[in-house]
Image: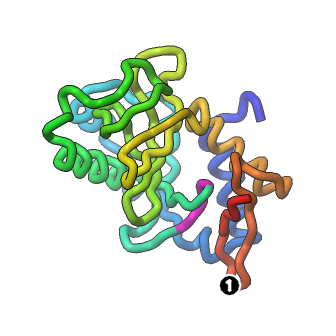
Amino acid sequence: MIGMDVPELWSQIVRWLERYAPVTAAALRPPAQQPAFDELEAEFAVALPEELRALWNCCGGTDSDVLADVLPPFYTPYGAERAFAAWRDHRKNWTAQWERPACDYYAGSPGSSFHPLWIPVAGDGFADELVVDLRPGRLHGCVLEWEQETAQVLRPEWTGVSAMLADVRRALSQGVPAGHSYPTVTEDGRLDWQIR
């Protein structure tokens, strides 16, 4: 839905989950406190887009050992603290290529090592993540899927955080796919995305 902001989209997703997938809804946490955006920006060495700030102001993710596949096809949203911890883990794991990642220069372009300007926003509980791409260019702020096993991203999944949330909200409310995944609800009340 054009013009809808991140907090409203997130609120609609949560309301849908509360009604139809209560176990998934119950796993979600509000932010424990206002994220320290100045400190995060200093550490990331980049200004955070308003959409990302808005997401972290309303979404605290889940407890660290809990998965809630809110974002297709199997991603649990991160709050700001967990996103920062994931980014720091990447910095440790990619030390040798941190200053010169094997990635194209512009946002939305492919890469085959983790780029410092990719900010994790959701994970699958193993090593794959959705990241917001803050490299320069017209796709600045797009959402990419980082695949740990192949150590790569290929193309943007969404043009930004609000586009991602709008796609999820539409899929849930209309029963249509978000990307290549269809929303279903398990018998025990969990949201599950089926890849078709």
Task: Using the image as rendered, state which of residue 130 and residue 155 is in the foreground.
Answer: 155
- Residue farthest along the left direction in this orientation: 96
- The part of the image, by quadrant, that contains residue 160 is top right
Task: Read off the residue under disc 1.
Answer: 188
- Looking at the rendered structure, the secondary structure element under dot 1 is loop
Quick check: 49 left or right of 167? left
Q: Name the residue: 37% across, 52% down.
A: 148
Q: Name the residue: 63% across, 49% down.
A: 10
Look at the picture and state if 24 lies above or below 84.
below
- The part of the image, by quadrant, that contains residue 6 is top right
Quick check: 168 left or right of 35? right
- Please provide percent x and percent y for residue 58: 52, 49
Image quarter in which the N terminus is found: top right
- The part of the image, by quadrant, that contains residue 13 is bottom right
Give the main secondary structure of the magenta stretch.
Answer: loop
Task: Using the image as rendered, state which of residue 116 and residue 22 is in the foreground.
Answer: 116
Q: Which residues are magenta?
A: 68-72
Could you tell me the amino acid type at mark 1? Answer: Asp
Q: Name the residue: 76% across, 57% down.
A: 172
Quick check: 105 left or right of 162? left
Quick check: 168 left or right of 147? right
- Please provide percent x and percent y for residue 56: 45, 45
Q: Name the residue: 45% across, 39% down.
A: 153
Task: Using the image as rendered, state which of residue 129 and residue 33 is in the foreground.
Answer: 129
